[in-house]
Amino acid sequence: MSKTAEQTPTEEMEHPVSPYLRMDRIPHIWCPTCGIGTVVRCYADALEHTGVDLDKLVIVSGIGCTGRVAGYMKLDAFHTTHGRAIPFATGLKLGRSELLVTVFSGDGDLVGIGGNHFIHAARRNIDMLVILVNNFIYGMTGGQNAPTTPTTARTSTMPFGNFERPFNLPHLAESCGATYVARWTSLHVRRLTKSFREAIDRKGFRFVEVISPCATLYARLNKLGTGFNLMRFYHDNAVIDHNADTRDLDINFQDKIICGKFVDKERPTYSEMMHEHYRKTLGDKFVPTPEEGGMIRDTEEKPVSKGKKPAKSRKSKASVSKSGKK
Amino acid sequence: MKTDPSGVLTGQHYLDGDHACGEGAMAAGCRFVAGYPITPSTEVVERISRRFPMMGGTFIQMEDEMASMAAIIGASWTGTKSMTVTSGPGFSLMMENIGLAAMMETPCVVVNVQRGGPSTGLPTMVGQSDMMQARWGSHGDYEIIALSPQSPQEAFDLMIDAFNLSEMYRVPVMFMTDECVGHMTEKVVIPKAEDIEIVPRKLTEKPPDKFWPYVTDKSMIPEFARAGDGYRFHTTGLTHNERGYPVMSAECQQECVTRLVDKIRHNAEDIIRFEEEDIDGADVVLVTYGITARVARRGIDIARRKGIKVGVIRLIVVWPFPERHIRELAPKIKAFVVPEINYGQIVLEVERCAAGQTRAVLVPHMGGSVHNPADIADAILEAAK
């Protein structure tokens, strides 16, 4: 296939988290002063400090600016359809329970088109970390109104100001059953990294919302200045309150943003509930899906009668086609 | 390889088509099913949810069909054979991620127990009107494989083929059964596990640093790496290159889409399956599939008693379509007759393949019941004139 995407690796100066990134895909597509890159950096730092087995870590994104994150992480990475990252990740986790699953996507993707999946995965307590970068707007498509757009903020589809009420995401996540809920801004790099580290080590449906500047659309449409001005705004208006009641975490236009870790509790995951229930009801008859997955392996190595083209011939030629064109 | 015996209920059974379909999936090695309840398909997952805990399978009832389809793609990337089950309205919702499965080249099986449509249509009654949707329902160019069983026994047997084909060609396979087969109870013989051949996932043997997920050879089927085996691959629904990296260019689109389509088109002769009967010297050839193939028997008998030489082509694999066969047969006969429980879908394909060399006569029926065999007989008699 085409090789036009390949970049010359810039290896003169190694970035501290480059082992976690697909450096052959850098530069990324995000705008100057966008906060997503910062969130990715914090996540990569957290991975380094938690020492998780990266071979077992999968990252799943949907569509949108943050939906591109999976494409830059050097992990088993899935860039899926709009809104469906969470159910896709559910299949990965239930198919092979030893996997550690991170869903990394945006507000429009996860709680707009994917809102139903979000609440059900939280309700079931599917074991996954969901990182939601909230820039208050649909960035990739040009600044349309989001389910997170603060009331009165202008967007390209609410040119006279948004009259809808946005989601309070920590409250939504907590009320649906999330075991870990935190909110930070992309200015809070140390606290955000610490939250990622904690959340990676926990079990169940873990949710971290990161408020992040979109200078190109949100700030421009609302005459809020540059990305730097937004970071300044976070600096002046973010209030850390770990004990806040999640019901009080609405974000109003250009008003204070309450940050912190609001929920950190244990609750049996979907798989734990299923296993415990089946053990109780079915006893010895219950056979759980193996941790390494439900793949049926060929134990006796016989030729496959159905396969007209044996796998062997395929393998020997594959390396040829890789070096040249097909 | 031989299948895992834990999923095989060897013996003679009295099963409806939905239960037989579920048994076929389990016998084929399916160990992950995500679904959402919808009549008339629900019995398939009811059967599976009762049996899966005893064979290491996982069933999850998702919040909707979009989620079900997404979940089976995710599970398939762990190497687990995966399936979802639905009917018309749910099939529509699955189209989004059927496209993703085609684009990511994810083996999986989608069962559609067809009912009358459009929209909510006839939830409890038969239809065959999703045949074109099975082929073209998701946006963009892609090819899939579709099978259509005519009996509970075939619902079992063809399920194994469906899983095998999905593994061989790395495509979503559409299992296009219908309410009538689904709810018809007949004898189903389930063979011993050692007599069931299944195609295992073909995992790459390359080391991770030598592996790109969409490198192919002449077979056009890339090797597979499972999530969690250390390959750290990337895959996307975007147009992508051999590395699985997005490339937004006409050149990459040309290569990516051409291969997705050609891996089926170029192997079509190997995939196509149909039964034929009394073709030599036939005046009229019936092209039929699914439950209608059985209803047509009566119509054929009536026409034959009136002296018409009637041949039959019963499609088992509907997509890809036996284009060459229809084209070669067309000049030798007076007409093709195509009864189907819709207002003309497969007949369009027959007509296209006949390419003006002979007529293709539709025997339409909008659904809610099978055809009246007399209508099929009348169409044959008329076509033979």
Image (cartoon, helix red, strand yellow):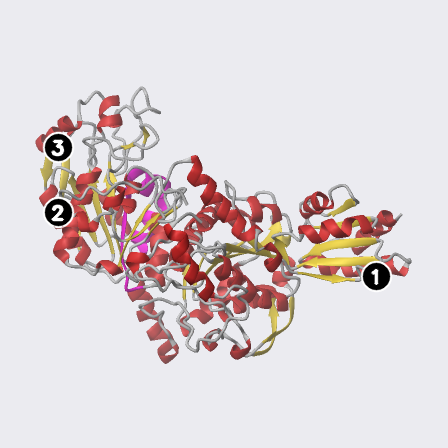
Labels 1 and 3 touching (C-beta < 8 A): no
> Do discs 2 and 3 belong to a common subunit?
yes
- Quarter of image, res A81: top left
> What is the crowding at mark 3: few (fewer than 14 residues within 10 Å), some, or many (at least 20)?
many
> Numbered disc 1: what chain?
B
> Numbered disc 3: what chain?
A
Task: Estimate the x, y position of residue B68 in percent, counting from the top left.
Answer: 43, 53
- How far is the residue under mark 2 from the one under mark 3? 26 Å
* Residue appearing at x 20%, y 49% in the figure: A181
> Do discs 1 and 2 belong to a common subunit?
no
The number of numbered discs placed on residues in the rendered structure image is: 3
Task: Estimate the x, y position of residue A225 in percent, counting from the top left.
Answer: 17, 22
> Do discs 1 and 3 belong to a common subunit?
no
| The stretch drawn in magenta includes residue B120 | no
Left or right, A240 with respect to A310, comes to left
- Label disc, if present, on residue B319 of the rendered structure: none
- Residue at the spot of label 3: A234
Which quadrant of the rendered structure holds the N terminus of chain A? top left
- Residue at the spot of label 2: A16
Range shown magenta: A97-125
Left or right, B161 with respect to A197, comes to right
Left or right, B88 with respect to A6, comes to right
Q: Eyeballing the image, is B247 above or below A152?
A: below
Residue found farthest to the right:
B307
| Amino acid at pointer 2 | Pro
| Amino acid at pointer 3 | Tyr
* Residue appearing at x 46%, y 75% in the figure: B4
Mark nearer the N terminus (2 vs 3): 2
